[in-house]
Amino acid sequence: MKVQSLRAKIAINKQVAAHAYKMTLMAPAIAKKAAPGQFVMVRVTDACLLLLRRPFGIHSVKGSNVDILYGLAGVGTKLLSQKKPGGYLDLLGPLGKGFDWRSGALVRQSPVLIAGGIGVAPLVFLAEKLKKLKPVVLLGAKTKSHILCEKEFKALGCDVKVATDDGSKGYKGFVSELLISVIASLPSVARNDVLSLYACGPRSMLKATAAIAKQYNISAQVSLEEHMACGIGACLGCVVKVKSKKEKGKSFEHKRVCKDGPVFDAKEIVWVPRPEPPNAKIRRRGTRDEFSAKNILLENSEG
């Protein structure tokens, strides 16, 4: 598929939650070729402040327009939130390998979409394609105000269930725990023939989803998020470990999230711990290591 590089006019850029924005871009060449799970690389500014483009999952496609949903995570997204309708952005896309939702038995199965936080972004586009199958959508977030796109999924006819860490809405706990209860509600003989899982969100959630899929022998696809510099596979800055199929005696190989993904079969991924980020020490307060404590909690709770 040919990648398009173009200047797209901003039609809409609006705040949809305290921490999130949705932007509509007039990009017919990208809209025509985009598939659920693919992404675009956006040049946020021409200033030297931010040299690298930012990756954003394609949230929805309507006619010649492409939507992206993004959270406020740093300088780049802060600048993006300040863009006005009528302005232009430089885009590269559609990029990456998206969800496989049309092949083989998948078209006869009941899809379950699992979203964690802003990971919901590419799943609306997927739900639009799968709406005839009446997907079950599981939305997870820290608290009620962080739940995104619930109305959009319901408008598509999806069965939406919510999990929040603090119990302010829906199930109290991780969305992966909610997934287990959904699977457990089905007869055991029907699970692997009926369900197919599609997930996007924090790495800990994806790791838990992969473990659950393996336990119940269910097909699962996960959309990974990694830091990207080029978006086209040239810089090798977003590689992940996957189980090797090429060389005997070699347990793993590396694949590029931007080119070979971002969507992978959950069985492929080698879920190795991530190294501590350079700024982790800055986040420590007193005797509490906030970074380590949070990750230990997720490792123990999410499997």
Image (cartoon, grey):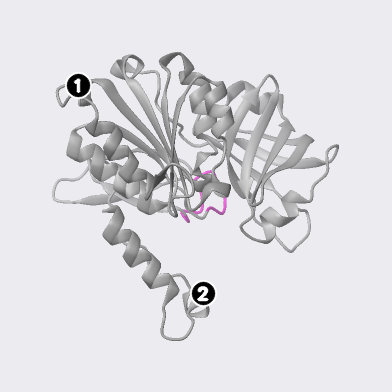
Looking at the image, do the residues carrying marks 1 and 2 touch, with CB atoms under 8 Å apart?
no
Q: Picture coordinates of residue 158 (x, y %)?
A: 47, 23
In the figure, 3 relative to 237: above or below?
above
> For this rendering, which residue is in front, 261 or 245?
261
Q: What is the three-letter code of the residue carrying label 1? A: Ala
Question: Secondary structure beneath disc 2?
Answer: loop
Q: Is residue 2 in view from this perspective?
A: no
- Which residue lies under the disc numbered 2? 279
- Residue lying furthest right: 86
What label sits on residue 173 in the rendered view? none
Specify whether residue 241 is in view: yes
Left or right: 23 as drawn, with respect to 146 = right
- x and y percentages locating residue 94 in the rendered image: 58, 33
Residue 160, how many percent across, how many down? 45, 30
Task: Indicate which disc, 1 or 2, sits on the residue closer to the N terminus.
Answer: 1
Name the residue located 51 percent from the left edge and 54 percent from the top edge.
Answer: 235
Instruction: Report the amino acid beneath label 2.
Output: Asn
Of the pair 21 and 255, the residue shown nearer to us = 21
Closer to the camera in the image, 120 or 101: 120
Task: Please say whether residue 144 is one of the residues in the magenta stretch.
Answer: no
Residue holding disc 1: 190
Q: Is residue 235 magenta?
A: yes
Q: Write down the region rendered in magenta.
A: 228-237
Q: CA distance from mark 1 to mark 2?
A: 47 Å
Q: Secondary structure at mark 1?
A: loop
- Packing grade of label 2 (10 A; few <14, some 14-19, many >=20) is few
